[in-house]
């Protein structure tokens, strides 16, 4: 099973991913975790350069790079999938879709970039307000994290696509309450 944790920048994805992985492992469920973008790779370094203003790319190229970053990890994902019951993704291809649409790219074109990647069985979107997002990280924000208007657009697209694709939305709350809500969703999914 692949579970993707998605949401706006500074929505708590990393925290909730860590809490989820710990809870699953404590329940003796073999779990692996991936985070995207993965800045440790050659492509990941290009993405990081772009996000922090050291590289310039047109929207199509940066979204190609985001997709390529996942594809360069495909063998690792497949290997982890064969050895674990659950893979937890701190962002997966869904964020490329959302941010790409926000950058004016076509949904179908963006989806083609992700062909060949294992599909997520469950997508959990952490729905956080722009104020919460901006209060969580005040400095060293990347290109997409700095613009409140863009941030609002991202939230709206996540909500719209969540309806369209039946992604689960978890509203921003305390860390523990958010975690409980995610665990409820996952328990239902596993039970079905």
Image (tube, rainbow, N blue to C red):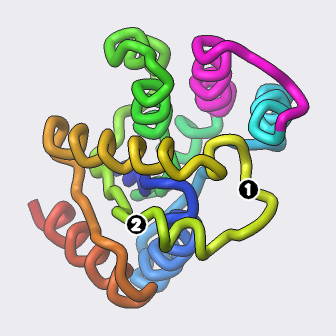
Where does residue 96 sit, x and y in percent of width and height?
49, 31
Q: Give the left or right position of residue 170, taking residue 6 as reference.
A: left
| Tag 2 secondary structure | loop
Q: Which residue is mark 1?
A: 141
Q: Main secondary structure of the magenta part?
A: helix
Name the quadrant containing residue 137.
Answer: bottom right
Where does residue 109 sit, x and y in percent of width and height?
40, 9
Instruction: Tell me which residue sits at (58%, 67%) in the image.
Output: 134
The mark total stands at 2
- In the displayed structure, 60 sits above or below 190; it is above
Where does residue 60 sit, x and y in percent of width and height?
59, 12
Q: Nearer the viewer, residue 30 or 55?
A: 55
- In the displayed structure, 108 sits above or below 151; it is above
Instruction: Tell me which residue sits at (53%, 67%) in the image.
Output: 133
In magenta, the rendered stretch is 53-75
- In the displayed structure, 103 sits above or below 16; it is above
Q: CA distance from mark 1 to mark 2?
A: 16 Å
Marker disc for residue 129: 2
């Amino acid at each position: 099973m692949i579970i993707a944790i998605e949401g706006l920048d500074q929505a708590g994805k990393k925290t909730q991913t860590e809490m989820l992985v710990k809870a699953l492992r404590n329940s003796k469920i073999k779990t692996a975790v991936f985070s995207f973008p993965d800045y440790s790779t050659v492509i990941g370094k290009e993405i990081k350069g772009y996000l922090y203003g050291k590289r310039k790319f047109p929207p199509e190229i940066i979204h190609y790079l985001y997709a390529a970053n996942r594809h360069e990890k495909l063998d690792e994902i497949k290997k982890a999938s064969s050895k674990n019951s659950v893979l937890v993704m701190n962002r997966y291809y869904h964020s490329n879709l959302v941010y790409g649409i926000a950058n004016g790219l076509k949904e179908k074109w963006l989806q083609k970039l992700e062909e060949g990647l294992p599909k997520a069985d469950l997508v959990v979107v952490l729905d956080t307000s722009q104020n919460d997002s901006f209060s969580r990280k005040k400095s060293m924000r990347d290109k997409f994290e700095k613009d409140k208007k863009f941030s609002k657009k991202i939230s709206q697209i996540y909500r719209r696509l969540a309806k369209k694709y039946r992604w689960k939305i978890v509203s921003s709350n305390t860390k523990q309450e958010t975690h409980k809500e995610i665990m409820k969703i996952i328990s239902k999914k596993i039970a079905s």
